[in-house]
């Protein structure tokens, strides 16, 4: 089913209507096989995939792509799964990537089970990102079954390291300097059919560790206390003024240290999450954080006896998620908004930290969308997915993916 160039772009509502009509058989197939997509969603969710250990889930997805007729399926050095239909150029440059992340926030000790509760599927990761991965399989099946041909190659990618300390590692690997540059990136993440994420929320993560000689809480009083220094740092950071525009947040997310109730700790630490849509603000707050930490270190050492070793500190940056913005009127955003409206849903532009962020920061048109249905309890063991209007999200993905091949 080859599409003329006028359809490949889908840059106007009229053209999008024509594209929707041309894709009517594929859209009908998505609806007819909905039970298959839900079964895939359950199956992939049951495969543990904590960040950094996505191998088994990646292998499962690669096998499914091959079963669905995608002949060129590879796994790169980072663990990303890249699926192509084969027969085209060996370069990924200029193609359109549809991506879904493999990893979950749950450690490998978390019991992974999916069960039905009324109209809902319940289980850790069922929406984020079991739904996104199932949507890629649905897209792969209908594109191959209807031999959908486009002016630019459609590439399906399952990425590693999207969550938490993964720091978007998989997408950073795919878009490393010198790597082939796609014409557009569509990240499929979780449930929903209204959001179009065109803003990349930047984030830096830090771990600050104070260390000292420690000692007895009575006999060695005066020895610098790392936990006191960590708490002092947390208080100073919490008091920092933050800009309201661009919206910026600073969160002391974790703090700890110490061995026993009657000891001066040998170590105290805290972890900090800083977020903003402005890279300059993130850089400035990173510098401010260092200044605050050094001030807390000096204060902790002020009253120590001369014969006691000073407290020291290390500052480690744990993550650096890029920020940026794809214009609200960019062709890819217009396409996504129009496709959403065509299906009877009011589109909503949003900002978030997703795989699309890496592409946006590099100047590549990119968005993130949900894969239909509704969800909640994300990142908890009681995460749930409701498939009401779930097919609508799959249709939206199909329209955007095929339309984007002409952008």
Image (cartoon, rainbow, N blue to C red):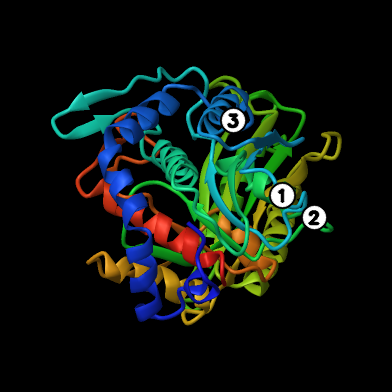
Residue sitting at 52 percent across and 71 percent down?
A: 4
Q: Quick one: label 1, few (<14), some, or many (20+) residues within 10 Å?
A: many
Q: Are marks 2 and 1 in contact (CB under 8 Å)?
A: yes
Kind of element beneath mark 3: helix
In the image, residue 43 sits, relative to residue 94, either above or below, namely: above
Q: Quick one: label 2, few (<14), some, or many (20+) residues within 10 Å?
A: few
The circle drawn on residue 179 is 2
Q: Quick one: label 3, few (<14), some, or many (20+) residues within 10 Å?
A: many
Q: Are marks 1 and 3 in contact (CB under 8 Å)?
A: no
Q: Quadrant of the C terminus?
A: bottom right
Q: Is residue 18 left or right of residue 44?
A: left
What residue is disc 1 on?
Answer: 174
The residue nearer to you, when weighing 23 against 230, is: 23
Q: Are marks 2 and 3 in contact (CB under 8 Å)?
A: no
Q: x and y percent of residue 353 in the render?
A: 52, 56
The residue nearer to you, when weighing 315 against 335, is: 335
Quick one: label 2 or label 3, which is nearer the N terminus?
3
* Residue lying farthest to the front in this orientation: 1
The circle drawn on residue 188 is none
Residue sitting at 72 percent across and 54 percent down?
A: 92
Residue 265 found in image quarter:
top right
Q: Is residue 100 left or right of residue 152?
A: left
How much space separates mark 1 and mark 3, taking CA atoms?
17 Å
Res. 124 visible in picture: no
How much space separates mark 2 and mark 3, taking CA atoms?
22 Å
Kind of element beneath mark 1: helix
In the image, residue 136 sits, relative to residue 337, either above or below, namely: above
Residue sitting at 76 percent across and 43 percent down?
A: 313
The residue nearer to you, when weighing 220 against 21, is: 21
The circle drawn on residue 62 is 3
Q: x and y percent of residue 389 in the render?
A: 22, 50
Residue sitting at 31 percent across and 50 percent down?
A: 372
């Amino acid at each position: 089913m080859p599409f003329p160039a006028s359809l490949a772009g889908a840059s106007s509502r009229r053209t999008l209507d024509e594209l929707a009509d041309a894709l009517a058989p594929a859209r009908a197939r998505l609806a007819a096989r909905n039970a298959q997509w839900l079964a895939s969603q359950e199956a992939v969710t049951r495969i543990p995939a904590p960040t950094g250990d996505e191998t088994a889930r990646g292998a499962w997805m690669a096998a499914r792509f091959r079963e669905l007729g995608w002949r060129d399926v590879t796994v790169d050095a980072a663990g990303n799964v890249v699926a192509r239909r084969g027969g085209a150029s060996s370069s990924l440059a200029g193609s359109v990537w549809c991506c879904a992340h493999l990893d979950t926030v749950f450690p490998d000790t978390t019991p992974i089970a999916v069960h039905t509760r009324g109209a809902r599927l319940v289980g850790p990761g069922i929406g984020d990102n079991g739904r996104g991965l199932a949507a890629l399989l649905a897209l792969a099946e209908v594109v191959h079954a209807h031999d959908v041909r486009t002016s630019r190659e459609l590439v399906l990618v399952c990425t590693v390291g999207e969550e938490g300390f993964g720091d978007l590692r998989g997408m950073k690997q795919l878009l490393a300097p010198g790597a082939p540059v796609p014409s557009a990136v569509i990240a499929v993440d979780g449930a929903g059919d209204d959001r179009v994420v065109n803003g990349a929320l930047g984030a830096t993560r830090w771990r600050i560790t104070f260390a000292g000689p420690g000692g007895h809480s009575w006999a060695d009083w005066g020895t610098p206390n790392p936990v006191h220094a960590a708490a002092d740092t947390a208080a100073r950071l919490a008091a920092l003024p933050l800009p309201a525009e661009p919206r910026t947040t600073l969160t002391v997310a974790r703090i700890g240290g110490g061995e026993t109730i009657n000891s001066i700790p040998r170590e105290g630490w805290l972890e900090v999450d800083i977020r903003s849509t402005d890279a300059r603000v993130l850089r400035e707050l990173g510098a401010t954080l260092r200044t605050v930490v050094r001030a807390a270190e000096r204060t902790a050492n002020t009253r120590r006896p001369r014969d006691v070793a000073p407290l020291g500190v290390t500052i480690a940056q744990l993550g650096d998620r890029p920020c940026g913005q794809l214009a609200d009127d960019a062709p890819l955003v217009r396409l996504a908004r129009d496709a959403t409206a065509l299906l009877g849903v009011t589109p909503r532009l949003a900002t978030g930290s997703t795989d699309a962020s890496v592409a946006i920061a590099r100047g590549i048109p990119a968005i993130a969308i949900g894969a239909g249905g509704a969800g909640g309890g994300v990142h908890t063991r009681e995460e749930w997915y409701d498939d009401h209007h779930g097919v609508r999200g799959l249709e939206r993905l199909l329209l955007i993916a095929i339309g984007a091949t002409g952008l």
